[in-house]
Image (cartoon, coloured by chain):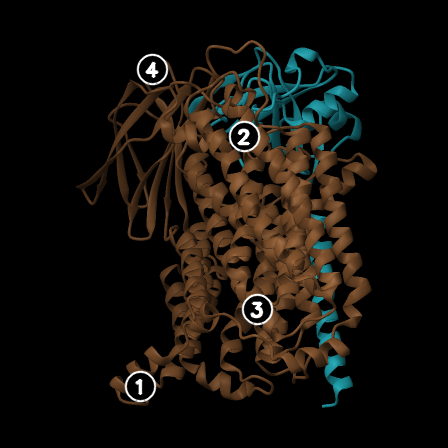
Amino acid sequence: MIAEAGHYALVLALALSLIQSTVPIAGARWGDAALMNVARSTALAQLLFVAVSCTALVMLHVSSDFSVANVFENSHSTKPLLYKITGVWGNHEGSMLLWVAILALFGGLVAAFGNNLPLSLRAHVLAVQGWIAAAFYLFILMTSNPFLRIATPPIEGRDLNPVLQDIGLAVHPPMLYLGYVGFSISFSFAVAALMEGRIDAAWARWVRPWTLVAWIFLTLGIAMGSYWAYYELGWGGWWFWDPVENASLMPWLAGTALLHSAVVMEKRNALKVWTILLSILTFSLSLLGTFLVRSGVLTSVHAFATDPTRGVFILLILCFFIGGSLTLYAWRASTLKQGGLFAPISREGALVLNNLFLTTACATVFVGTLYPLALEVLTGDKISVGAPFFNLTFGPLFVPLMMAMSFGPLLAWKRGDLLGAAQRLTAAGIAALVAIAVAYAWTYGGSTFAPLAIGLAIFVIAGAMCDLAERTALFRAPFATAMQRARGLPRATWGTAFAHAGVGVALIGIVCETTWNSEYIGTLKPNEVARVAGYELKLDGVTQRQGPNYREMIAQFTVRLDGEKLSVMTPSKRNFTTRGSSTTEAALLTRGASQLYISLGESTNEGAVAVRIYHKPLVLLIWWGPVLMAFGGMLSLSDRRLRVGAPKPAKASRALQAAE
Amino acid sequence: MTRKQRRLTMIGGSLAVLAVAAALVLNAMRDSIVFFSTPSMAAEKQIPAGKRFRLGGLVQPGSLVRGDNLAVNFSVADGSAVLPVAYKGILPDLFREGQGVVAEGAIDASGVFRADTVLAKHDETYMPKDVADALKKQGHWKDDYGAKPSASAAPMQGAPK
């Protein structure tokens, strides 16, 4: 009954999305406010029905109703409640349902909070959302229905992939989807602007907060996924340049570029056509990511299913939306009014540079990710493009970007003073040189590249602080005045500083982890000691334990530093009987921003166990960086200017523009 | 600067960055791309020693020998050729004899494939796609290698995801 209700709710949502995608546009053509307002009510109703559908699937999973194929294949009655709930999106069908649910959520938010949007713009935006939603409802209902029943219900389910039975599954996919799908809003706004043939600075003001929300979630989602891979896969790696990771990185790079170009558009009414293109590209890359992950052309942890019909269907959706929007862009972009003028050395110029490097970096990732697929289709040769390729292309492009990053905020709009900015960055430059010298002396004889990279990171962080110090007149004015000015600064300025510093922080973590990582790989017998980076780890013993749906082998290590006992670490290896597969649960010991990492291999007959022990210096900075970036994003989002909402463009000017 | 000069500066700058990026990509393509081979393809192509590639096939039953200090030797077979593989480290959770494996490394002077990464299937019904395709091509595909990963069978590799 619940399954049928969920299925039916999804069909109703499809019907609503079809209405939402047509009626408001007709209303906008005829200037009929009532028809345009249909968009709002259908978007809200759609959200309601998708929510019903999701709730139904969650209830089926929680109650272990194995007569539903999706529950049978991905659940087990002994599975803990948390994983019964998160297991809903730990499979292809459920994750697509989550995808449309988040799409409906964003549509509903625009409908609910878009009261200050011009009526026809809102109608168009929601109509485009309706098209996307309709395509994905059709996809789910035709190829990936999560509510299918099994004729003869089995007694027990097949359990969820053990790797996914982790708290990470509760956080990573929803976050990532909030990011991916959130970019659909800026896409819809862009397509709506092209359809209306009108775009102004106010448009950018509406788009910016939505893009920012999506970007914050995508940043956190990617960081969370990276940390999850780090502790769950047992290899201590946090980024593999796996195609699926690249699929999430590409929208992030394009989205970051979009965030910055939208600033130019809002402040200076320039780069309009480019901002529209970026909005389209960002969501197109999100769709591409969905295609790569969901179609089964790639094999990875994320590829739940390989069913050709699904791949073809998503490919059609992909072609329709990317091809359609780009055609519309080619056709209509010339009708949009060109923006203002600015000198190359200016805030706008710096932001253009940022866009240039980010999109180019994105393009290299695109090439590296899709080239193997294209080559296999064309010649049948199988190749793999791994980390070396990306280190050689992506890395060099990020260096000038990060160098320019400190200068950007210090340049004035329209016409900047590079020399003046450089003078104000003197302190940051000195800090960077000191950092290079210290890092070089400390690791004398080691890598020369790493100290330079650390210097760059310090330059970025100190540059962000210089910017703040400059704006608050810290050290120049009395402290109280500076504090007062700090309070008076727009939140967006603080946001910029935090986000930029976050990039530097992440870079320090990346450099330290990759350069000064030390490891011990070998077999240990009880009471034997392994030494890594000054730490002594003694294997106390190995015990067996029975978990809810697995058996576990736990090794206990006592960690000592300089003979003093620090802590006990208990890595384990879990064997899931239902699936006959095992997972490695690494043990982590955090020391400041550094971590000790132990994961277990196979055990031998003599009671010895293979272990992998890593000491990863400052590894946590890799994830604190993105958290800082996201925090900066949130500060920007809370800026009064964005919260209050964009002012309505004056009636007169609108009439003028429409006449163009 | 006139509007035209500014536009030219912009376009010139963009082209310069794109050219640099293209050069980086082409350079990286030449050096850091790894081809996939099965043992018979490797024998056929006479892959020179020291050239990195990905070796895929089935772990030959009975060939797994564990040495001291995590050294492992096994053979990868694809029905018509066999290539011995040496690896040092911890094998993926579900590395098993008779099942699919992908190893990355290079052949050394003595003709042994020295792997620095070993990826194994992670599910009863899953076989690395590269291996399955190659075996199918050579007609060694047996249906019992897992009729088809079922919807839930989240295929995965042991090492890099």
Residue B81 percent location from the top left of the image: 72, 18
Q: Secondary structure at mark 4?
A: loop
Q: Which mark is residue A475?
A: 1
Report, in whole angstroms, how far the alpha carbon at label 1 lies from the one at label 3: 30 Å
Q: Pinpoint the chain carrying mark 3.
A: A
Report, in whole angstroms, how far the alpha carbon at label 4 lies from the one at label 2: 54 Å
Between A368 and A290, the residue placed more toward the observer is A290
Q: Quadrant of the N terminus of chain B?
A: bottom right
Q: According to the rendering, which colour does chain A have?
A: brown
Report, in whole angstroms, how far the alpha carbon at label 2 lies from the one at label 3: 41 Å
Mark closer to the chain start, 2 or 3: 2
Report, in whole angstroms, how far the alpha carbon at label 1 lies from the one at label 4: 67 Å
Q: Which mark is residue A6?
A: 2
Q: Pinpoint the chain carrying mark 1.
A: A
Question: Can residue B89 be spotted in the picture?
Answer: no
Quadrant hosting residue A439: bottom left
Q: Secondary structure at mark 3?
A: helix
Residue A306 percent location from the top left of the image: 66, 28
Q: Secondary structure at mark 2?
A: helix
Discs 4, 3: same chain: yes
Quadrant hosting residue A497: bottom left
A156 on left or right of B150: left
Q: Read off the residue under disc 4.
A: A606
Q: Are marks 1 and 2 in contact (CB under 8 Å)?
A: no
Mark closer to the chain start, 4 or 3: 3
The mark lying in front, picked from 1 and 3, is: 3
Question: Can residue A76 be spotted in the picture?
Answer: yes
The mark lying in front, picked from 2 and 3, is: 2
The mark lying in front, picked from 4 and 3, is: 3
Q: Read off the residue under disc 3.
A: A260
Q: Are marks 1 and 4 in contact (CB under 8 Å)?
A: no
Mark closer to the chain start, 1 or 3: 3
